Image (cartoon, rainbow, N blue to C red):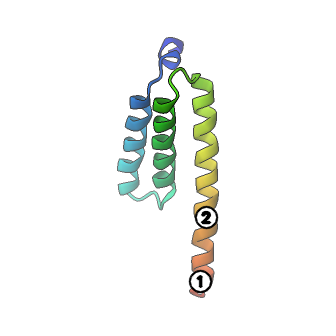
Amino acid sequence: MWEYLHHLSFWDWLAFGTLLLILEVFGAGGYLLWSGVAAAVVGLFAHLTPGLHWSLQFILFAALSLATAIWWRRRHRAGASRNGER
């Protein structure tokens, strides 16, 4: 397992992002969409910076997932309040 993590490539992140996007189709309400996008961004970043340590990749994924989830929630609430919903 540790050996796999030490050699994590951008293809792994792109595959993970694709899996999350496929799961989003089954009705996760938008959350997996943004986590999938975050995984794809980490994959792109890992491709552009070879040798990026796996722990930094996970930290970047967690930060991007959290940031996009917060952004999505605020955007969704703002749209609901404009329409008179709660």
* Residue at image point 44% right, 34% down: 13
Query: Vertically, is 7 above or below 66?
Result: above
Residue under the image location 42 percent in, 42 percent down: 17
- Kindly identify the amino acid type of the residue bearing the numbered disc 1: Glu
Q: CA distance from mark 2 to mark 1?
A: 14 Å
Q: Is residue 76 above or below residue 17?
A: below
How crowded pointer 1 is (Cα within 10 Å; few <14, some 14-19, many 20+) is rated as few
Residue lying at the far front of the rendered structure:
48
> Which residue is under mark 2?
73
Q: Is residue 5 above or below residue 40?
A: above
Above or below, 63 relative to 7: below
For the C terminus, the image quarter is: bottom right
Task: Determine which quarter of the picture holds residue 61.
Answer: top right
Q: How many marks?
A: 2
SS at mark 2 in the image: helix
Amino acid identity at mark 2: Arg
Mark 2 neighbour class, 10 Å CA radius: few under 14, some 14 to 19, many 20 or more: some
Give me the residue at 51% from left, 38% from top.
42
- In this rendering, would 30 be left or right of 73? left
- Tell me the number on the disc at residue 85: 1
Quadrant for residue 77, please give it.
Answer: bottom right
Are discs 2 and 1 less than 8 Å apart at CB?
no
In this view, the mark in front (2 or 1) = 2
Give the percent coordinates (x, y) of residue 5.
Answer: 52, 19
Identify the residue shown where x is 59% and y is 69%. 75
| Disc nearer the start of the sequence (2/1) | 2
